[in-house]
Amino acid sequence: MAARIKKGDLVEVISGKDKGKRGKVLRVIPKEGKVIVEGVNVLKRHQRPNPRMREGGIVEREAPLFMNKVMLICPNCGQKTRVGFRVLEDGKRVRYCKKCEEIIDR
């Protein structure tokens, strides 16, 4: 499967409880088809004190979302868009915005 969404991309959630929220992709888990997006799908977890974390308590952290629940925001036109692939003259494979036809990868 091709990498339509990569770490560092700006995405918008298109379904679920966080529909409409935008955030930066922190991590991609291709085996599971999931992504972790900054500030989206935040869960509260009870954390016991340990050597790494002196204080326990309730910790908020982002949980993975399925990739098909997010759409890429084009850095050129600023709209959520589908992603296509092109092969350049030098043989490099790049992603492009299907709305404005501009290349996303530089």
Image: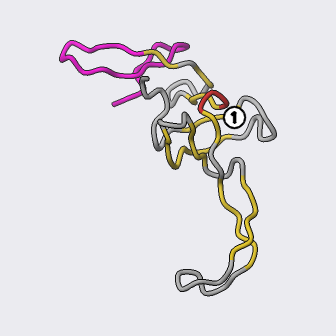
Q: What residue sits 30% from the left and 20% below the top? A: 93
Above-or-below relation of 15 to 41:
above
Where's the N terminus, which quadrant?
Answer: top left
Give the camera-side residue of 55 and 100: 55
Q: What residue sits 56% from the left and 41% below the top? A: 35
Residue farthest along the right direction in this orientation: 17
Give the camera-side residue of 8 and 99: 8
Q: Position of residue 98 (x, y in %)?
A: 52, 13
Q: Position of residue 99 (x, y in %)?
A: 55, 13
Q: Is residue 24 magenta?
A: no
Q: Which residues are magenta?
A: 85-106
Q: How was this image coloured?
A: secondary structure
Above-or-below relation of 105 to 52:
above
Amino acid marked by disc 1? Val
Q: Position of residue 94 (x, y in %)?
A: 35, 22
Secondary structure of residue under mark 1? strand
- Is 63 on the left or on the right of 86, as rendered? right
**Would you say the magenta stretch is mainly helix, strand or loop?**
loop
Q: How many marks?
A: 1
Other-residue count near label 1 (Cα within 10 Å), few / some / many at <14 / 14–19 / ≥20: many
Above-or-below relation of 95 to 47:
above
- Is 42 on the left or on the right of 30, as rendered? right
Q: Is residue 99 magenta?
A: yes
Residue farthest along the left direction in this orientation: 90
Q: Position of residue 106 (x, y in %)?
A: 33, 31
- Is 98 on the left or on the right of 13, as rendered? left
Query: What residue is disc 1 on?
Result: 13
Above-or-below relation of 82 to 50:
above
Q: What residue sits 66% from the left and 60% below the top? A: 61
